[in-house]
Amino acid sequence: KTPAATPRAAAPTTTPGAYAEADVKAAEAFGRVDDNGTVFVKDGETEREVGQFPDVSKEEALALYARRFLDLKAKLDLLATRLNAANIKPREIDESVKLLGEETAEPAVVGDIAALKAQFEQLKAAGEAKKAEIAKARKAAQAKAVAERTAIVEKAEALAASLGDNTNWRSTADKFRNLFDEWQNHQRTTVRIDKPEAEALWKRFSAARTTFNQARRKWAQARDNERNHAKEVKEAIIAEANELKDSTAWGETSRKFNDLMDRWKKAGRAGRNEDDELWAKFREAADTFFNARQADRDQMNSAEKENLAAKEALLVKAEALVPVKTEAEAKKARQELAKIQEEWDQIGYVPRDDMRRIENRLDAVDKQIKAIEDAAWKQTDPETDARRSSFEEQLNAQLAELNEKIAAESDPKKKAKLEAEKATKEQWLNAIK
């Protein structure tokens, strides 16, 4: 006989009252309890012992084993529900069917055992059907994944086949990088493709990237040659500037420095970092000369104040030339600014403390016009186009973020500061369009 269970060991696995009383009573109809507390259940044409619970009433003992029957049935019902779930796996089905097969083989419960076993057999058959459905779906998913990954490969191959003199290398590199990210994301988020197919597709994708990388290296070498030439030209300009920086022939040397500046602008770019370093050296020589010239002008204080007033009047005219938005407007503004600059140079010296301030204001006008001129010139430069596009995207993102901050800011001072920053970035954006 089954060893007598203590009340603690035989405690119900469900919360009392979790099942409807009618369900418990219906299950109890298939069992009985003798005077010794032994519990029996009708199992087909026979009756078998399922356990003992001697220290409680017959009603309590029978109810306990009836609830155990309902617990087991609840497990079967749960599997039936899980079989309808989209995320169920074949392994889960096999494990659940195996476990429930063991539990329903000869369960220590009181209830309709025949109905329980029949339900299990139905679930077992449904499980096999579900596994077949999953296998079919997986096969279709694999075919879909192969088609999607093939599409990625074909895009890469098309990019590799389109390379030429007009290729935007930075933009194309971004496209290859995006395709590679798409490839990796596809591997992570879709079903596993059979190894031979996956390797063949990767070989094609890798070959396309290699073709691009080799072509880009050749382009980069040519670009580096151009930058090296620009560096040599600028170093020669710096050497001339150092020879001029101690001159006291203010007018003649000023014109020479202007000529050097024109040559500098035409020399091209030597690379961002090297350009900054070269410009600092050139600017140092130019500052040495112009600072000395300014010191000499300090001796003419009264006349310089009159000159300052005249130049400030010219600044009003110069600043009225901007902003400009189109190349035509920039050209017209440049012509007017040239006249103003010519008149500016004829006026004479201004107080040293004011020189940089008014020069910066005039430079600011020049830079705004130059920004439009440069933007028009760079329209045909692939590298610049990509850099402008990237900068434009950054500015748009920053403007969107500033709009959110402005909308959320309640402090008037902080809000005004944010709006000033927004206006500056909008001006930059207009300049590069």
Image (tube, helix red, strand yellow):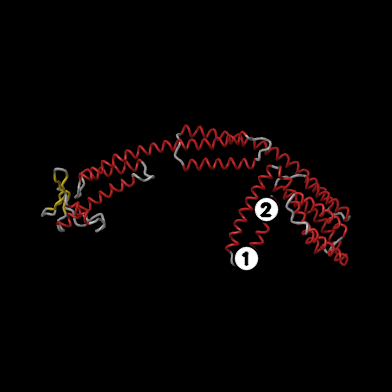
- Residue at 75% across / 44% down in the picture? 268
Residue position marked by numbered label 2 in the rendering: 429
Give the CA distance from mark 1 to mark 2: 23 Å
- Residue at 60% across / 43% down in the picture? 174
Residue 72, numbered circle: none
Query: Would you place residue 219 above or below residue 273 in this image?
Result: above
Q: Nearer the viewer, residue 243 or 105?
A: 105
Residue 297: percent from left, percent from top: 86, 62
Q: Is residue 211 left or right of residue 133?
A: right
Query: Would you place residue 94 above or below residue 59 in this image?
Result: above
Query: Would you place residue 177 above or below residue 34 in this image?
Result: above
Q: Nearer the viewer, residue 40 or 376?
A: 376
Query: Which tag is nearer the camera, tag 1 or tag 2?
Result: 2
- Residue at 26% across / 57% down in the picture? 18
Q: Is residue 165 left or right of residue 95?
A: right
Residue 325: percent from left, percent from top: 73, 52
Q: Helix, strand or loop at disc 1?
A: helix
Q: How many labels, in total? A: 2
Residue position marked by numbered label 1 in the rendering: 414
Q: Is residue 348 left or right of residue 121?
A: right
- Residue at 34% across / 46% down in the picture? 82
Q: Are marks 1 and 2 in contact (CB under 8 Å)?
A: no
Residue 314, located in which quarter of the rendered image? bottom right
Sequence-earlier tag: 1 or 2? 1
Residue 266: percent from left, percent from top: 78, 45
